[in-house]
Image (tube, helix red, strand yellow):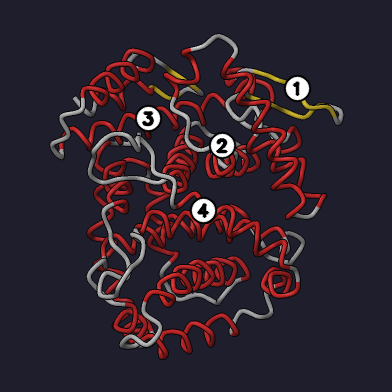
Amino acid sequence: MIRKALLLKIFSAAYMQRWNDKVRPVEFVELDKQAHKMVAAYFLGKFEEKTEGFDWIEVIEGGLFELLQRLVITDLKPPIFYKIKSDKEKYRKLNEWVFTEIEPIISPLGTDFSDRFRGYFGPSGESVNRRVLAAAHYYATRWEFDILERANPDGYEISSIRDNLRRKQEEYADIKGMAALKADGRYRSFLDLCGQLRFQIRWSNLHRIPRTSVIGHSLYVALLTYLFSLESGACRRRRINNYFTGLFHDLPEVLTRDIISPVKSSVEGLSDLIKEYEKEQMDKEVYGLIPRSWHPEIRLFTADEFSGVVTVNGKRRRVSSEEIGKKYNYDRFNPRDGQLVKAADGLAAFIEAHVAINNGSQSPEFQVAKMAFRERYGRASIAGINIGEIYADFE
């Protein structure tokens, strides 16, 4: 069962400042960096899908495990961390300590999950999945650095950081997607477009701490959806589709901005009009930046994202979460559990409001939002998960 402690621990990445010893033209936080990293991991992973040993589940869980590790070793600057990592015994001891810190909050997910977390940082070869994650990590870091460098081009350590990041990226030149990024500007534009969601702030008209971006919220939804999927016994393809739907479900907002639900529902037909405009803009601005073979999958993740869908005899069909669990929970049906993504999206918004209130926000909108989500999901059960019990954990 997913518990409050884990949910709040993951959300704490929204507090973690990055590059906080440098002049920053914009605020960089860890949750946003991890989100952008996983978008880049999806891009790079698409080029490696047919590579022997490639596994989307290991990429997804590896991203989560690395985030949890980062949340514990937050005070270690990268040069110190990589120096420790180069010493196998010191790195083993560091990760043993990380596990003792994290194990109490992940243990409710079961011993298999705890064992996978612990084993991920044990001695092992560098698989294609880990290399994809590492390449994505350095891509997202370099993306931040390019912005930071413009504000402080001759600053202390800037040249050495630039050279080090260049060397690190060159280590992953064999990753097919890295070569594609270098060769085709459209691909870089796609990741830049996704990166702009780092600058779009949710609840932007209200004062709150911490502020969360659209892309940070999207990663949080993806992680909650994945954990829900594990708990519900979802098949591999359902877990993958659910995760990436969570990660990309707000991508159209880079073209329309974050339009809050009360505005969408205030005028009859407005929500449908916004959806139609999002579709038009996605066709115009996004799909031309990625290979055509990816279009059906990105549409699955971004259009009608809160509906349950399966593929039967080559045709996509809408079904409920309950039907997926009973009849279609097999990879061959390519299931996506939109109701579960919607529940995760609601829980993420609830937690954003909950934390804002606990941090002193006096805006009544947060109290109204908390009450609305509690009323909607307080007794809900989706995909065999007692969602209401999770909300009760916050009382």
List the residue tagged with mark 2. 256
Going by the numbered disc 1, the residue's amino acid type is Arg
**Residue mark closest to the camera, 4 vs 1:** 4
The first of marks 1 and 3 along the sequence is: 1
| Cα–Cα gap, marks 3 and 4 | 24 Å
Label 3: which residue?
A: 347
- Residue 196 badge: 4
Give the residue at mark 1. Answer: 317
- Label 1: few (<14), some (14–19) or many (≥20) C-alpha neighbours in 10 Å: some
Which kind of residue does numbered mark 4 sit on?
Answer: Gln
348 left or right, relative to 291: left
The residue type indicated by label 2 comes to Thr
Frontmost of labels 3 and 4 is 4
The circle on residue 240 is: none
Which quadrant of the figure has residue 121? Answer: bottom left
Given the current orientation, which residue lies at the most extreme left position?
Answer: 360
